[in-house]
Amino acid sequence: MTRFALPGLLSALLLLPAPAADLPADADKRVKEYEAQREAIRKKADDDTAAALTRLVADLTALQEVYDKAGKKDDAKAVADRIARLARDADRAANVLVNGSFEDGPGAAAGGFVPVPAESTDIKGWKVTTGSVDHISTYWKAADGERSLDLNGNEVGAIAQTFKTAKGQKYRVTFALSVNADSGAEAVKVKVAAAGKSEEVTFVKKEVSKENMGWEIKAWEFTATDDETTLEFTSLHTDEAFCGPALDDVVVAPVKK
Ligand SMILES: [Ca+2]
Ligand SMILES: [Ca+2]
């Protein structure tokens, strides 16, 4: 073994890439040109894809209205759900939320959930703002990952997260909604609110079980009025104390024009 072979051998043994040799300036300039070009191509592809999605969402929204007016409620609902899923999948990489899927929290308890009271920040990134919520682990199957929420912990609850926003920018909120499988209600409502606007979103209970929660993806938009925005989900289900709307997989991303 010569002394010149040693560094290469060590790199191989340690599975480290051999360091690139310093390039002369003219060659380095040419490589950097290529890298800039590559980034521009990627950005254009991203922008074109986002624009195509925006057109698709507009077309599907128009179709949804047609089905709605024709009284074809199931078709309208199926189209709305697909719009939300397409938007969520496109937005996921740009999610501005921390822990939007509630995976980081108090974790598993004997009963498969942990009640989290008002003022608590035990669910990373979020603050319980009213009543209590349950951080669900094994009690039912999450929409995404292993954890989700019951927005009625031991009573009607609410949870909020504050994040940086660009004033005047439109943001899309998508989230998975269901209902506590133990609920006897025919439907539950949640209020989603941000930047002084809010909407009541309903989940109609059909054949919901702990194994198959029938999660629906909902979409809502708001325009930021400040450089910080608070998004809040509030249970409007006051008929039952312990069973409320189930929430998971919250994604917030700027809407590209
Ligand atoms: Ca989750
Ligand atoms: Ca509960």
Image: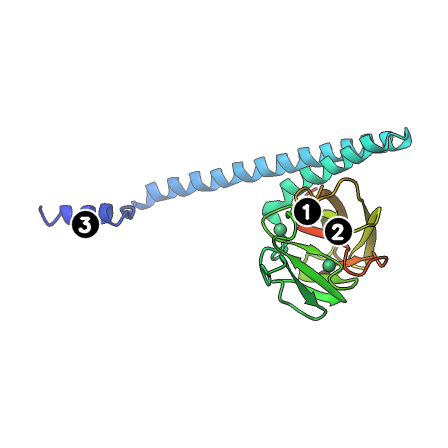
The residue indicated by pointer 1 is 210
Q: Nearer the viewer, mark 2 or mark 3?
A: 2
The residue indicated by pointer 2 is 182
Q: Residues within 10 Å of mark 3 (few under 14, many from 20)?
A: few
Q: Can residue 228 be seen in this view?
A: no
Q: How far apart are marks 2 and 3 (CA)?
A: 64 Å
Q: Quadrant of residue 216?
A: top right
Front-most of 246 and 231? Answer: 246
Q: Which element is circle 1 on? A: loop
Against 178, residue 235 (above or below) is: below
Which residue lies at the image location 83% right of the left edge and 49% below the top edge?
185
Asked whether mark 2 lies closer than 8 Å to ligand 2, one says: no
Q: Position of residue 182 (x, y in %)?
A: 75, 51
Q: Position of residue 44 (x, y in %)?
A: 58, 37
Q: Which element is circle 2 on? A: loop
Which residue lies at the image location 59% right of the left edge and 55% below the top edge?
103
Task: Determine contact: label 2, label 3, CB under 8 Å.
Answer: no
Amino acid type, residue under disc 2 in the picture = Asp
The residue indicated by pointer 3 is 7
